[in-house]
Image (spheres, helix red, strand yellow):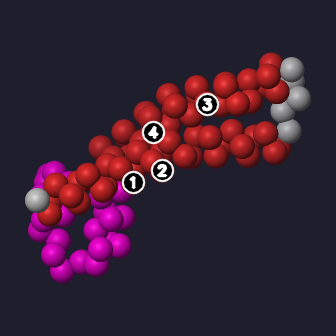
Amino acid sequence: MNSPIETLKQSTRSSNTSNWIQLACNPSVVRRGVVYSLVVGTLLAIINQGDVIMQGRLTWWHGLKIALTYLVPYAVSTLSSVGAMQTSVRS
């Protein structure tokens, strides 16, 4: 199995969007994003919503905010991983 960088180098015919999606769905990128999301998202959720959770006043709105709290670190990790791989190929 080729590394994500080798796959990107070989796929010169595909569009940039297709390459980006392929790299973003790579198991190593997804795994890294999930780990960062769980660690950072949990810390941020406790900091931002901990009082509401502890008091038992959790509403659907708080649940949505907590979900977004986990989504943001995943997105940042994925964007930075794919960007770094693309930069590595260009150099």
Residue type, mark 2 in image: Ala
Q: Are marks 1 and 2 in contact (CB under 8 Å)?
A: yes
Residue 37 in picture, x, y percent from top left: 50, 37
Q: CA distance from mark 3 to mark 2?
A: 15 Å
According to the image, label 3 marks what residue? 44
Q: Residue at x 45, y 48 (%)?
A: 76
Residue 24 in picture, x, y percent from top left: 36, 56
Q: Name the disc covering residue 75, or none.
A: 2
Q: CA distance from mark 1 to mark 3?
A: 20 Å
Which stretch did the figure color magenta?
1-26
Q: CA distance from mark 1 to mark 2?
A: 6 Å
Question: Label 4's element?
Answer: helix
Judge whether residue 63 is colored magenta: no
According to the image, label 4 marks what residue? 34
Residue 63 in picture, x, y percent from top left: 75, 40
According to the image, label 1 marks what residue? 79
Disc with the residue nearer the chain's start (1 vs 3):
3
Residue 23 in picture, x, y percent from top left: 30, 58
Disc with the residue nearer the chain's start (3 vs 2):
3
Give the class, few, some or many, for how many residues have Cα within 10 Å of label 1's Cα (few <14, many ≥20): some
Q: Name the disc covering residue 14, or none.
A: none
Give the class, few, some or many, for how many residues have Cα within 10 Å of label 4's Cα (few <14, many ≥20): many
